[in-house]
Amino acid sequence: MNNALVLAAVIGLFTCRHVAGSQVHRVRGVPISKTSLYPADRDFQCLDGSLFIPFNRVNDDYCDCADGSDEPATSACSNGSFFCHNPGHRPQYIPSSWVNDGVCDCCDASDEYASGKSCVDNCHELGKEARIEAQRLAELAKEGNKIRLEMMNRGKQIKTEQQSQIVKLRADYEEAERMKKEKEVIKNQVEEREKIALEKYKPAEPERIINDPEEDEISSNEAEDYFNHLDSDSSGTVTVAELQVRQTFDVNRNGEVSLDEAKYFLNNKEEVTLQEFLDSAWANVKPYVMLEEGTFKQLNQEESETGEHDDPERSKEEEEEHEAEGEENAEDAEIESEPPAPQYDEETQILISEADKGRSQFKDAENAVKDLLAELRKLEDQIDRDYGPDQEFAPLDGQCFDYTDIEYVYTFCPFGKATQKSKSGGSEVILGHWHEWVEFKGNRYSAMKFDRGLACWNGPTRSTTVHLSCGTENKILAVSEPSRCEYAMEFATPAVCHVDGIGDSHDEL
Amino acid sequence: MSLGVRFGLFLAALSCVYLVSGVDRNNFKTCEQSSFCRRCRKVEPGKTPYKLLNTVEVRETDLSGELFNQDTGVAYILRLTGLADNTYRVWINEKNPLHPRFEATFALQSDPVPKKIKLIEQTAEYIVVGTDHTKAKLFFNPFRIDFYRGEQLVLSANARGLMRFEHIRTKPEPKPEGEEGEKPAETNPEFPGDGADSDPGAWEENFKSHHDSKPYGPEAVALDFSFIGAENVYGVPEHAGSFALKSTKKSDPYRLYNLDVFEYEIDDFMSLYGAIPVVFGHGKESGTSGVYWQNAAETWVDITSSADNNVVESIVNFVSGSAKKPQVDAHFISESGLIDAFFMLGPSPLDAFRQYTRLTGSAPLPQMFSLGYHQCRWNYNDQDDVRQVAENFDKYDLPMDVMWLDIEYTDGKKYFTWDTRKFSQPLEMVHNLTEKGRKLVVIIDPHIKRDQNYFLHNDATNLGYYVKHRDGKDYEGWCWPGATSYIDMFDPKVRQYYIEQYNLDKFTGTTNDVYIWNDMNEPSVFNGPEVTMPKDLIHYENWEHRDIHNINGMMFTSATHEALFRRSGGSLRPFVLTRSFFAGSQRYGAMWTGDNTGEWNHLRISYPMCLSLAVSGFSFCGADIGGFFKNPDNELFIRWNQAAAWLPFMRQHSHIETKRREPWVFGDNTLGIVRETLKRRYAYLPLWYTLFREHEISGIPVIRPIWAHYPTESAAFTIDDEILVGDSLLVRPVLEPGLTEVSVYFPGEGKITWYNIDTMQPYKQPGAVSVPVTMERIPVYQRSGSIVPKKNRSRRSTVAMKNDPYTLMVIADDDGSATGTLYIDDESSFEYRHGKYLYIRFTLTGYKLTSNFMDKLATYDTKSWLERIDIANPPKNIKSAQLTSKTLGIVELEAKYNTRNNVLTVRKPGVNMGEEWSIELIH
């Protein structure tokens, strides 16, 4: 018989230990709690009940049971598990394929009993280290938990504030709407009077007065025209599908307008009404329209240098610049083309100035409504946000955290965005906008997913997953890029510290 | 590795460029764009100007004579040599060349063994020489050579009269103005010339923005070979096309010119990274024969078949008198060098394959670890990444033997250095791997960064080790590091220098457990013509790059192989992976099919590509699992792993722009399937290892086309989605999405039954049968009458499996017999060459199964023992078994019959594999 078999036969079957004065049979590779399933005085029944085998076939280095239960301490069954007692440290199961494979896996060295590999029993050392570490983590969790409770309170407070603010805002909004309507009535009245008065001066330039060309009305007309242009089925809404047929919106120039690309322009909606289009979508659309028309030279050039096409933040800024420029031009043009003003009599003049006043007041009221609406939407958005079961993540909203490695400075703004900036300069690269929580092992708030970042060459848009762990301060611990354009951050925060350890991504000891 | 990044940067600079993926064919020449190919392809059949003078001389092992070109008046030396094992060599050069021509003899493992030939017959028209079994019949005018196996004509050279041997000439003086149109004054009216002079590409040639100065002018060689009776021809890898070669009547010829083809596509004819100029013809009646065209210059091969209707019919009629006989012709065209052709006359497929490896060598037995699973990516980012990925293989219970590092481990692409920020402790990283029985492979490429702070660049510059321009200046190209030059591996001093760089005290951070990957060795030059070196560069001893291009990659790999051999003091078997290769490269390591794409058609093509390599001497072949470019979905990923588990080299690799694709990122279901796939690969490693050893000894391929063992089954001649592993397993991967059944061709014409290795369900019906498939596995069958050795225990690496016991899978044929072999040694060292091994034959005859040492003098002290024997289709009513061996004496064993799958299991014979034994089945 060869060496391995002899060893297996002699020491593989079972060992004896004195426990509290009585002798207990202990089957190698089996925890004491399961020893009773391996009675030495009768045939062994495979734990799945499928077969009875003589007890001397337990741990005899041949797999008899389909479930591998007859060979807990040999590698004979591919599906078996070996139990390391690891006195002084945590006990552990390892795959039985790791038994006697020349690699020390159990800290008590029990898995390499016949491979010739000499393993050292370092369970006491490791156990000590582990206990110290466990203690450290427990203290961390305790400290962190205190802060979490504070964050929770702050979060709830924020929520309450937001709720009362939203009530106030809604009231203000309604009031503003009412005011707007009132002013509109007044405006209509004075305009009607003005119109009648001006009748007599007709056809001497009536529309100049009516069409007082405010800048954003031009813009809004242009936007409206473009809306109608896009709304190919004249349904009154612009849909994703209507955008997808237009090359203008092929942000990454891959020859087709993807759903994501189209949705970007509609702020992630499937379709928008004219009002929604004017309020928000037009700002996204405009740079690309201009790019297409060749009027957006500056952006175009810069893009050529950096190869970045779809940085919405930057595009917006430039768009604003451009709009400002456009306004000047419009004014210039107006001055040049203005015909000589006709002479009105005094009464008419009064009516005109009353009408102007009515218009201006209406305009102010209208703007007030717009502003309130925007504020309201923002707040509604926030209030709907999932800040954790106890609002403990709410205080993080609006904050940003930096992390510097060899080449880059990374910034992470929870519920906002993640960015990367080269230390040697260059523009900020968006690694993703807040998307959603990621569940891991039953913990709904285990990681934060940011997506729709800057598109990669020949690849996806950048995205970032931020894994949360317990810490007494909010801090980025590490940043990596496991796959090209898919970033991973480790973020420590008290918001996930629990005294019972839940919510901490570290393994419990 | 590829040009991806370079393209990325380039495109990023032009933000609005419309991206198109796939190969840009405009970067590569057509035959018409290549002057020598154009000239040789235009040669009209049936009008050869060559005649053999009847002053031939027959000596002990060869015949020599003089050829004369009646168009040019140039004389040539012809030598025909008889070689061992039904092989002939025909060598032709100019009688008085103006300068020497390159001979690619480095491809040969040693001088071919000559064989005595005798003069058999001589007439005014021909002379016949040969041996007892074969003969060569040389016709004087027009010149032609016919090769006979017995009385059967199997091969013919210049039967179509397409031979062309452009003699080296002096460049005509530029004509003074106004004197154009006339032929050069020195033209002898007796000899009209070969027409090369009037080709505008004869003395210089442009392709895109590249100029080739062609200082030696036209010097092409070409010859046609007719495979009489062949229905198909195979070989001339590397091409991403079908195994059976297609007619080139309506396409460009097959091209052999080692190139880094960015995002290559499925294409039968385009060049790829490697070139093996060997072609085998096979027919049901004719058997197999082959031609090895030993030439390292750019080569094109035209294939014409009698099935194309009429092209070759006149010759068929002429040589055989039968118009019905099939025939395939191969017309080899090379830019320079000389004619050095080897004729391998078979008769069987395995004979012809062996005859080729007797010339260029077989692959030495690799270390066991290299047959395990390899995990690669461009790039594992840093040492923690490597550790984490390796740990996850344990965590997810997946066997894995080797972690790989692509170019990013280096300091700025300076090979033999480390990026010390990302890999600050390489020795610790290696140790973490070896502790678990694993290895590391790192990449070393042949381009050297032109960086004055780089020792290798400074040494190479100062010592003159770089490939040079004609004016003696170092050539500078563009590759991964930016500006690069290329060390000239043809120079023995350079080789010596390069080999020394691998010494462990020089290449710090490496150990004897670190092995090497050679990429980009075509060589790839991003800004060069066709992404490689200009042809007029100068190598050692003044050879032009033109002359040596196709063997360039092999010179690099062979030096790496030598370096690893010496590094361990000759004790450990080297492992080198190469992308570029030539005839003979199999002696130095493994190859893979380069930068493929994660699409179904690329998975599909990996089988014919590796089959083509295998019959061309190079068995150790694999393709990047999942495809280098693009991201495979779950189904493609699963099918790719399942298919790759049955190719000799199994490695996952991916582009830097792709998503991670370690098996656990695809979810639990996919992970589970891939786990079983990897475990099955490992379970069959004893078979793979035995086959590699048998390949080393006999030269026959590890994986084989069906017709290799079933040469008369015409229906199998074009099957290339199904392979034989050795002669006992039949593998039919699933190569298309969404399939619930596949067509499996069962060879053997009903005399053989094939058993599904999972269910042991027998398939008796021969020919194509539709078989259901699930996602879990692909159909694999074991042949009745075979015994396959396995190790069924699952372990984390091959090192951990070394002492594990064996299981024998026996399938009794209808006579109750079966045989198989098993080879065992230390799995890593060269001790086996000193008799430290076991080579065992297992034989089942009726009720008795025996183990016998085929080599009685060899010994190896193994700890492995016999765990289990499964016998399918066993003798009836077996009650028990009885083992007899020298040390155990007689041992009673339990034998249990499973009625569900008709398998008898003999429980735990327990005998050590190091002794002979027999087992009697008791009924």
Image (tube, coloured by chain):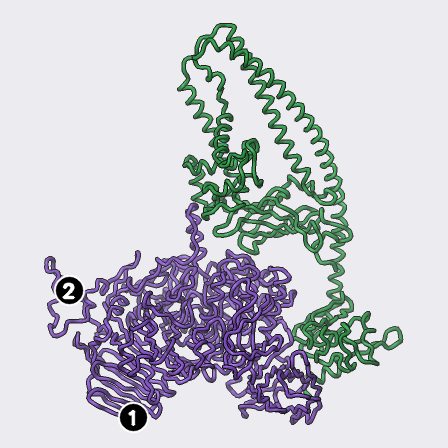
Q: Identify which residue is drawn at 80% across, 80% down.
A: A43
Q: Identify which residue is drawn at 71% across, 45% down.
A: A388
The residue singled out by tag 1 in the image is B118
Asked whether the viewer can see residue B410, the reply is no
The chain carrying label 2 is B
The chain assigned the colour green in the figure is A
Numbered circle sitting on residue B173 = 2
Coordinates of residue B262 in the picture (x, y in percent):
42, 60
* N-term-proximal mark, 2 vs 1: 1
The chain assigned the colour purple in the figure is B
In the image, B775 versus A449, the foreground residue is: B775
Quick check: A97 left or right of B231?
right
Asked whether the viewer can see residue B242, the reply is yes
- Point out the residue furthest to the top here: A346
Coordinates of residue B596 in the picture (x, y in percent):
46, 63
Coordinates of residue B104 in the picture (x, y in percent):
34, 76
